[in-house]
Image (cartoon, grey):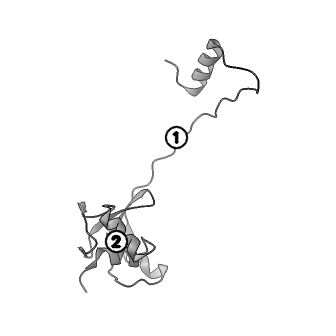
Amino acid sequence: MDSVRLDSWVWAARLAKTRSQATAACRAGHVRVNDQPAKAAQAVRVGDEVRVRLHGFDRVYRVTGLASRRGSAADAAHYFEDLTPPAPPRVERPAPVLRDRGAGRPTKRERREIDKLRGMEH
């Protein structure tokens, strides 16, 4: 076996929960093979780079094994190599400025101080 269908490989590698979800992701354009949009029936070979956008995140995988049947998670780990770059560090944001209940609207001076605390001064 030198190639398998893309949707069955995505399902067998446990990147999608069901085969129909894998097919729908291919139809929607969320799966790319070697930076080209891919259809569900496209053949995938060892060494291909597969980009999958599932659950709102882009993941990059290199195909290291072929399977058309779903097995255990331990077996699925042998079918791909994860090439996804690490996520950028989260930017720390200052805590929101809380006003006492019933204090009313901030004055112009207080507003400038709040903006300075938030780092939005001009």
Residue 35 found in image quarter = bottom left
Q: Which of 33 and 106 is in front in this view?
A: 106
Dot 2, crowdedness within 10 Å: few (<14), some or many (≥20)? many
Which residue is at 44% across, 56% downward?
Answer: 56
Q: Nearer the viewer, residue 54 or 60?
A: 54
Which residue is at 42% across, 83% downward?
Answer: 70
Nearer mark to the viewer, of 1 and 2: 2
Which residue is at 52% across, 40% downward?
Answer: 91
Residue 114 rendering spot, x and y as whole percentages:
62, 22
Mark 2: amino acid: Thr
Q: Nearer the viewer, residue 77 or 95?
A: 95
Residue 27 found in image quarter = bottom left
Q: Which residue is label 1 attached to?
A: 91
Residue 14 rendering spot, x and y as whole percentages:
43, 74
Q: Tell me which numbered mark, 1 or 2, is placed earlier along the sequence.
A: 2
Residue 101 visible to an observer of this rendering: yes
Dot 1, crowdedness within 10 Å: few (<14), some or many (≥20)? few
Residue 118 rendering spot, x and y as whole percentages:
58, 27
In the rendered structure, find residue 79 and report the number of the disc placed on it.
none
Question: Disc count in the image?
Answer: 2
Q: What element carries label 2?
A: helix
Mark 1: amino acid: Val
Residue 12 drawn above or below residue 26:
below
Residue 108 drawn above or below residue 58:
above
Residue 47 found in image quarter = bottom left
Q: Marks 1 and 2, Cα distance to the nearest angstrom? A: 36 Å
Residue 115 rendering spot, x and y as whole percentages:
57, 22
Q: Which residue is label 2 attached to?
A: 23
Q: Please give left or right for residue 121 compared with residue 71 in the image.
A: right
Q: What element carries label 1?
A: loop
